[in-house]
Image: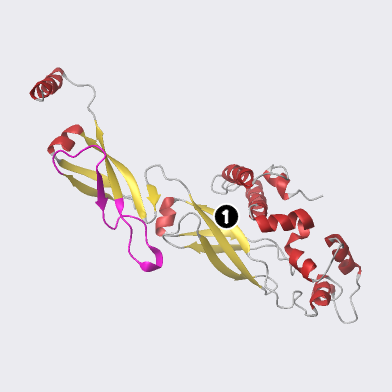
Amino acid sequence: MAKSYYDTLGVPRDASEKEVRSAYRRLARKYHPDVNRGDKRAESRFKEINEAYQVLADAENRKKYDRFGENWRHADQFVRAGAGGASPSTWFGRARRRSPGRGETQESGAGGFGDLLGDLFGTRTRTGFGGFAAQPVDLPITVTLEEAYAGAKRMVQTAPDPISGEAGRRLEVTIPAGVASGSRVHIGAPTPSGAPLDIYLSVTVAPHPRFERKGNDLLTQVSVPLADAVLGGEVEVPTITGAKVALKLPPETQNGRVFRLRGKGMPKGRGGGHGDLLATVKVVLPTGLSDEQRGLFERLQELGR
């Protein structure tokens, strides 16, 4: 018996959306191909996890799966055809029991699932679904902030073709520059049977240790020695590209002051241009003072009274 999507993610059938998402993230991190390079078993497990999450994370698809099991993709066809109380296994059983006619083969659609759908929809073609498009596929994908800035390419694995029965394929997809968490990137691709397939990449941008994203702007902190904050000076601010930008500090720069570096943020997509980089000053107090330095601070303290 095939493992259920719930078993794949290790959650109960009544798991909440939050529990499903949490289980997916934990398993995806563990089995991600980037973490397990060259490990075919981990790659296969990652595909199973993705497939399960695509279904259980979508409320409508989850309802179909709970009712129709592994045949959930054809739920709409069953309902529109008036399947009534007949279970999906009954309908598929009828299709399997039919015999090919003279001059026809099972692959051509006669006597198989293509004929069954032909009967249901009043169409009978040799492509199986009679021109019906394959159900859209959502593939979760995680990119780094650097990849979101510059754009990236990924290899994705499609599910087996429900029309032809052929195995899924690996496709190279392009993730546009400026993509944000929650974005859905559309990719059109033909299935082996020739039916159009719409793929939507559900993008998550991984947290970055130095930068925080806010819209098209990036936020970061820059450490400033106390003397430079008081007297003025120049510090280097890192950018998402790896380059550093010189920032001139005016005398008496306060801790927490924010400086805006124009055009050093994320790409704005089709609108062109970039957001800004917001650098927050973090004044670093000196440690390990020499006697002379301590004396100067004591003198400064006296002058301030």
Q: Which residue does the image show at 28% across and 43% down from the upper left?
A: 280
Is 274 contained in the magenta span?
yes
Q: Is residue 279 above or below residue 301?
A: below
| Position in image of residue 285 (x %, y %) | 23, 29
Horizontal relation, residue 68 to residue 148: left or right: right
Kindly give the residue lying farthest to the left in the view shown: 303
Which one is nearer the viewer's eye here, 78 or 266? 78
**Dot 1 surroundings within 10 Å: few (below 14), some, or many (20 or more)?**
some
Q: Which residues are magenta?
A: 250-277
Q: Is residue 210 above or below residue 125?
A: above
Q: Is residue 119 above or below residue 21?
A: below
Is 235 contained in the magenta span?
no
Q: Which residue does the image show at 77% across and 57% down from the upper left?
A: 70
Horizontal relation, residue 19 to residue 144: left or right: right
Quarter of the figure that contains the C terminus:
top left
Which secondary structure lies at badge 1? strand
Kindly give the residue lying farthest to the bottom in the view shown: 103
| Position in image of residue 8 (x %, y %) | 70, 46
Which one is nearer the viewer's eye here, 224 or 82? 82
- In the rendered image, which residue does mark 1 sit on? 140
Q: Amino acid at mark 1?
A: Pro
Horizontal relation, residue 258 to residue 48: left or right: left
